[in-house]
Amino acid sequence: MALNLRPDFPLVSEPDPLIVMRGLSREFLRVGQEPLVVLDEVNLTIRSGEFVAITGPSGSGKSTLMYIMGCLDQSSGGEYLWHGQHIHQMTPKQLAYLRNHDFGFIFQSFHLLPRLVAWENVALPLIYSGVSRKQRKERACELLDRIGLGDRLEHFPSQLSGGQQQRVAIARALINQPTLILADEPTGNLDSRTSVEIMELLRNLNDQGATLVMVTHDGSLAAMAHRQVEVIDGRIARDVLLKGIPD
């Protein structure tokens, strides 16, 4: 029986794509040199409930694609539609709201604040939502308990193993009940056994209705997804359906 991490994830049935990217590009200007093209005419559609693995060699542009998807970076050209709305037409305040409420970020390096205990790290996004300290602690502790860290609530990151730190990071990504979970090499700093445990957590979340986009260089992890999108030299070289989305 799968661990019920997010009982409040709705079952998604709308036909419209969650994400549509058309002709998306990203260039970096270099003094005295030609612009560095990181993404070149990317076309990508992601529907609600999918688990998409983005793969490719180092420097291919896969992480940049994910950062643009999560509004952590901006494209140089092309279109990005979120729920049918043009990202480029949104104000900084609207983009900040999306990052805090609609997107949940999981990174390879965890990015936990060393002076905050586990529940405080998880509750951090709630501060920007105006939630009281009492409610923040209740929600964070409940979520940590669901992922097996109920006995580590008052532990600092330095007192946790790598796998435990990543679980805290996953809980932090879920605390605002995001529509989309973006994971950039989420098992890159973990041993093989812990990597399997973290992937099971992510798969459970997807089974419960979360849309999951994961950047990885590991073929065995990519094989767990519904789709594999391979990025090479800033372009989508391959977009393969591996398995159907569960009803």
Image: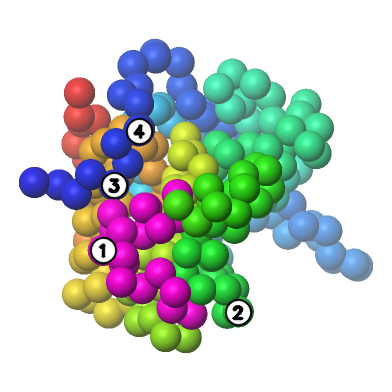
Amino acid marked by disc 1: Gly
**Mark sitting on residue 8:** 4
Amino acid marked by disc 3: Leu
Give the alpha-carbon distance from disc 1 to disc 4, as whole Å.
18 Å
Residue at the spot x=45%, y=15% of the render? Answer: 16
Question: Which region shows up in magenta?
Answer: 139-157
- 56 or 112: nearer the eye? 112
Residue at the spot x=61%, y=26% of the render? Answer: 81
Which residue is labeled 3 in the image?
5
Quick one: label 3 or label 2, which is nearer the N terminus?
3
Dot 2, how many residues are within 10 Å of its Cα: few (below 14), some (14-19), or many (20+)? few
For label 1, the SS is loop
In the displayed image of the protein, which residue is found farthest to the left? 1
Which residue is labeled 2 in the image?
115
- 81 or 141: nearer the eye? 141
Residue 165 lies, in percent from the top left, at 41, 73
For label 3, the SS is loop
Quick one: label 4 or label 2, which is nearer the N terminus?
4
The correct choice, above or below, for 44 with respect to 110 in the image is: above
Residue 183 lies, in percent from the top left, at 44, 55
**Mark sitting on residue 148:** 1
